[in-house]
Amino acid sequence: MSITCRHIDQSRFERLGFVVEYAEDEESAVTEMVDAEANHGHCEEMPTDIPYYGSYGAGDNYGPGHVVCDGKEYEDVPATSDGFVVAWNFTSGRPMLESIQRIRRYLKLERKVNKLFKALREKEPKEHRFSPHTQCCIKCGISANDDLVENRPCIK
């Protein structure tokens, strides 16, 4: 299972077994975390009072899905890497309304959380942060050896 959350909420997910997979840098407001051993996508354990989104793979007796929470509402929908799984009414030959409504709620919440995370990222300093190994900015990729680097703000 993987999730994207605010850095300040990282410890909540660490208690469930998640570890940091990727942090944009030490001062980043947003962090990506994984739990390779998550069963059932931590279905009953996921917090419902903080913003995050994520996905989980299939297990022996459950399918893959996506989760999202904006801090007030939480939605868990069946989904694969190809898209959402829509429950189908074979009698009427049409998709089930409840399934469509859950997907719409998920998409609404995901847009809201992504907007929040984008705003948090935009508040981060626009300074270059150079890798000691590559001598390039970890955000925009510019070389520390570039003569104009001190006159250009980081673009990411």
Image: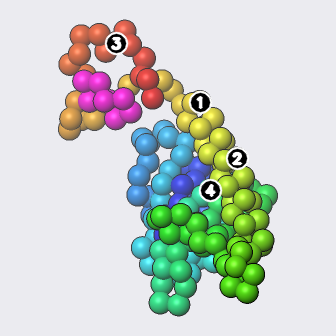
Task: Please state if 33 lies on the left or on the right of 41 as rendered.
Answer: left
Q: Please rate how many residues cluster around mark 2, counting C-alpha atoms within 10 Å: few if below 14, some from 14 to 19, many from 20.
A: some
Observer-side mark, 4 or 2, equals: 2
The answer to whether the residue labelled 1 contacts the one labelled 3, judged by CB atoms less than 8 Å apart, is: no
Q: Position of residue 37 (x, y in %)?
A: 44, 78
Q: Secondary structure at mark 3?
A: helix
Q: Nearer the viewer, residue 100 or 72?
A: 100
Counting residues from the start of the chain, the first of labels 4 and 2 encountered is 4
The answer to whether the residue labelled 1 contacts the one labelled 2, judged by CB atoms less than 8 Å apart, is: no
Q: Position of residue 15 (x, y in %)?
A: 56, 70
Q: Position of residue 9 (x, y in %)?
A: 61, 55
Gap in angstroms between the C-alphas marked 4 and 3: 35 Å
Question: What residue did someone put label 4 on?
Answer: 52
Gap in angstroms between the C-alphas marked 1 and 4: 18 Å
Question: What residue did someone put label 3 on?
Answer: 150
The residue under the point 63% across, 35% down is 119
Residue type at mark 1?
Answer: Lys
Q: Secondary structure at mark 2?
A: helix
Gap in angstroms between the C-alphas marked 2 and 3: 35 Å
The label shown at residue 26 is none
* Magenta-colored span: 136-143
Observer-side mark, 4 or 3, equals: 4
Residue type at mark 3?
Answer: Glu
Observer-side mark, 1 or 2, equals: 2
The residue under the point 55% across, 42% down is 29
Question: What residue did someone put label 1 on?
Answer: 123
Gap in angstroms between the C-alphas marked 1 and 3: 20 Å
Residue type at mark 2?
Answer: Lys
Residue type at mark 4?
Answer: Tyr
Observer-side mark, 2 or 3, equals: 2
Question: What residue did someone put label 2 on?
Answer: 112
Number of labelled discs?
A: 4
